[in-house]
Image: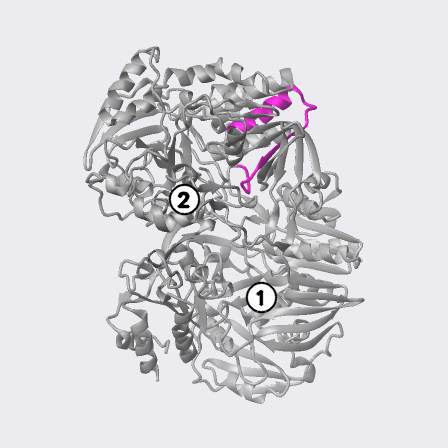
Amino acid sequence: MKILVGIKRVVDYNVRVRVLADGSGVDTDGVKMSVNPFDEIALEEALRIRDAGNAEEVIVVSAGGDECQQQLRTGLAMGADRAIQIQTSEGLQPLSTARAFLKVIEREDPGLVLLGKQAIDDDNCQTGQMLAALWERPQATSASKLELNGNSATVVREVDAGLETIEIDLPAVVTVDLRLNEPRFVKLPDIMKAKRKPMDVVSLEELGVAIEGNLEIGHYAPPPQREQGIMVEDAAQLVEELKNRGLL
Amino acid sequence: MTAREIMEYDVIIVGAGPAGLSCAIRLKQLKPDLMVAVIEKGAQIGAHILSGAVIEPEPLDQLLPGWRENPPPVCIPVAKDELWLLTKKGKIRLPTPPQQKNHGNFIVSLGSMCAWMAQKAEALEVDIFPGYAAAEIRFNDDGAVGGVIIGDMGVDSAGKHKDNYMQGIEIHAAMTLLCEGCRGHLSKQLIRKFELDKDCDPQTYGIGMKELWRLQPGKSKPGLVQHTTGWPLDAKTYGGSFIYHLDKDRIAIGFVTGLDYQDPAFRPFEAFQQMKHHPMFHELLEGGEILSSGARAIVEGGYQSLPKTEMPGALLIGDAAGLLNVPKIKGTHQAMRCGMMAAEHINDTASAEGFDAKLRDSEIVRELYKVRNIRPAFYQGLWRGFVRSAIETVTLGKLPTTLSIHDDDSTLKKRDDYTAPDRKWVDRDLPPRDRLAAVYFAATEHDENQPVHLRILEPDICTTRCAEEYDNPCTRFCPANVYEMVADDRVQKDGGRRLQINASNCVHCKVCDIKDPYQIINWVTPEGGCGPNYQNM
Amino acid sequence: MSKILIIAEHDGQSLNISTAKCVTCAQAIGGNIDIAVFGSGIETIAAEAASLESVARVIAVDAEHLSAPIAANWANEVLAIADGYSHLLGPSTTLGKDLMPRIAALAGVNQVSDIMAVNAPTSFKRPIYAGNAIIDVEVPAGATVVATVRIASWQAAATTGGGSVEVRSASSNAVKHTRYVGLKSGGGERPDLQSAQRVVSGGRGVGSEENFKVIYSLADKLGAGVGASRAAVDAGYVPNEMQVGQTGKIISPDLYMAFGISGAIQHVTGIKDAGTIVAINKDSESPIFEIADIGLVGDLFKIIPELEKLLD
């Protein structure tokens, strides 16, 4: 089967993100851009499945401007066989992204679609679920373990109450969480090999998808400052204060 | 252990700084078919680059004509120079010495400029690999340098292979260029192995600390270049500050102290923070925010400390050799010129041989020679230093004597032998609060589960002799709070304390490798991609 | 006027507090508030939901195949009753995050994730970049608002309500392609650090692995999770999984109590979204007192026993 892995170009997780003084956005001037860390984990899982002989091809897909080709090349260097860029210069939000991905799914007919559970820039945590809904296929989100059993898969999900196990029939969408695996490092020679691997570019229009229903994003504000705290004299005062605040 | 995979290049360049990138670009300009690779331990180009910086543009004009139409992202023409002598509360304007006249020069972010140069190198088909650390030199059978070995990745703190273990590959190359910047760890090994420093004075360094600030609107004066000397340092400690006014309400503010300081209790980071609280700067910084901070050692020995720069199969380029012009406080133009010269030499001869003589005969070293006595003049203190520097400047360095350079590790006095002057330091209210807060702004990151890259060769000394004689100066000279002496119930002896190494705070400045009085700290490279993530520094 | 439908979260026995917090958010939006409860044998839960203040009606869809929170099944049920509602809300818990986007896609709209505050019925504040920026988002006119509610930002609504309960049968059959197998609760009786409402943390000031038992003891008394600063982990007092901070876990409990922790910025990064930060430290100069909501200078080894006695 083919595995499609969605990856997103995001501000590197090490960057200290700052809001612009005029509130019009976040300062991304000169910052390092990387593959969304959860997406790297998704790609690693796909590569392991392929390397174990349970898939023939791993295809990395990313939607955005031509800059995301850099991240697609990283995906190829990690070991993906092929890359597809869904090209658009407009702002993509999860619904349109999911609709565009669906078109790629219709072209490629994968057995499994893996995505990171959320992107660390927008923190929306929606695309995988939306894709599954539009595709009318199962979704397994926040996966920390994935086991293939022929035409189905057993997924362990990290949920608030603990670990939930579900079984899903393939093809399906799985979004991955931090503890699923530790992504491999890229070998230098593979960076060179990646330059020669195929990268297809297809525009949003060619896919027949129009961006619609975008939420309008207004003002960007820095996080609220904590108000000045108070000092208490002893344990008794502390308990009193906590009771007054409804915390005990 | 399985045999390492091999990649072959004609030239391998270690370090994507101005020297390395200039060399790479020049090599491809001269011979487009040459296979050239640059490896860089920072996660992206510029991540480990920290410099003031005011640069002389001539090498850029030579290397990349037309660059002024599409300059690097942070590039402000210098408008004005000021030199100030500070006292605790006051300031006296001094005449700007000729070496600090910056008309025609540019204030840049060296990190951004290197990222910009890297793009040009890639356009010429140089293979650039950020995130990979050259851990070892590869030697040919005849003992010549034959390339480098990339560090293994995915090794845990006990040295065992993690699940994602990846063996480092070997890069074979006929020419290896060490462009690691000052006190490069591979350069250090090669200097020792080939005895490259046997005919020169010891190298001496400074620690440079820098913060990038966004001020309240209207406070910065783009193009203004300010330097200070005097307070908060005493007359026997060399150093001073720089404040370079950029665009978008930003300033680069920094502080340099010679690492030959004597006071074992001295805290360079604290001195930097004190300087910011001088009335002249406090007012400027108030209400602003820190964008980035970091530190790096600076090479100061100049002409007398320049080692031999060639060895079979390899060259030392840029500050790995030590070409920074101290009175100008500039090394970038030297590094670029040296990189280009190395490229031309390799193109002509395909060998290292003869490069050192060419370098010593060039404008690059002539420039160092002219100012060779200025740094050591300050060994006699601030005032004698000024006088001697003035004389050297006026006589264009042509006086017959050459002062010797001393090393930094043996200049530190034992605490019993030293009484610190009253520094008149003040209470602070500007960020960063302390070194840990500063480290936060360096965005430094190391996978904590890897071998500690600060190797203490004789750890017993720390809790015994060093604690006794110097009171563990590493806990003070490290700008990132890597070293701490902590009380530990489990330690039976030595006053119940042990040395804790917070390796993941390290900003790769190399000061510990330099200043440790017993020379038992050996800085080696951690896993590639670790370390600071400087932006626009 | 808005008509809001909240999808309830429960564990088969009782309502999850996140539902009561969704109600408060719905109150901020204003308008009619209904709650949908899906599951099997859910009478008590439905009654609990109906008792939340401002709730007009609870729609209880009782069916065997709905007892497991399979997003595909629940989404089908929501779509079947969604007509007429201007807002569909769920909690930003793993359940809500799993379910609500599926609903949004089927409804043909983008979702507003993690509502922190309500500006207007169709305008909200939400965090991006891990809370380093807060943005205002506006849902386009005419579109249904599908959203998740950020639990840490809202208080639980009181149980002073008296809404009605309407029992219905499921509209769809179970989807065949997804099957629930089981749930393994987080090990141990202590709440998981990442999701605990209260956390007690120890730092270098605790002094040893042995001494950490005072932290565990207080945590157990409070029903809290236990965390530690990097210094404590580095010194070997506790295992690595307990580290809270920039390179450890980033948590947002309602109550965070830090004992013997200096409050370096790297640690504070991990708790900046905590509701109330309490700091106990011997050193009055510790940076933690600059961000703590309640500070107490003193010896933790004296204060913790005193606290435990007072809590008895």
Q: Which mark is residue B291?
A: 2
Looking at the image, which is closer to me, B466 or A169?
A: B466
Q: Which residues are magenta?
A: B18-45
Amino acid at circle 1: Thr
What crowding class fits label 2: few (fewer than 14 Cα within 10 Å), some (14-19), or many (20 or more)?
Answer: many
On the image, the x and y values in percent for residue B332 come to 46, 26
On the image, the x and y values in percent for residue B444 come to 47, 47
On the image, the x and y values in percent for residue B357 come to 52, 15
Q: Which residue corresponds to the image point at 23% horizontal and 71% vertical from the top-left? A: A233
Looking at the image, which is closer to me, B37 or B409?
A: B409
SS at mark 2? strand
* Residue position marked by numbered label 1 in the rendering: C144
Q: Is residue B12 above or below residue C113?
A: above
Hey, which quadrant is residue C217 in on the image?
A: bottom left
Amino acid at circle 2: Leu
Residue B33 belongs to the span the image colors magenta: yes
Quadrant position of the N terminus of chain A in the picture: bottom right
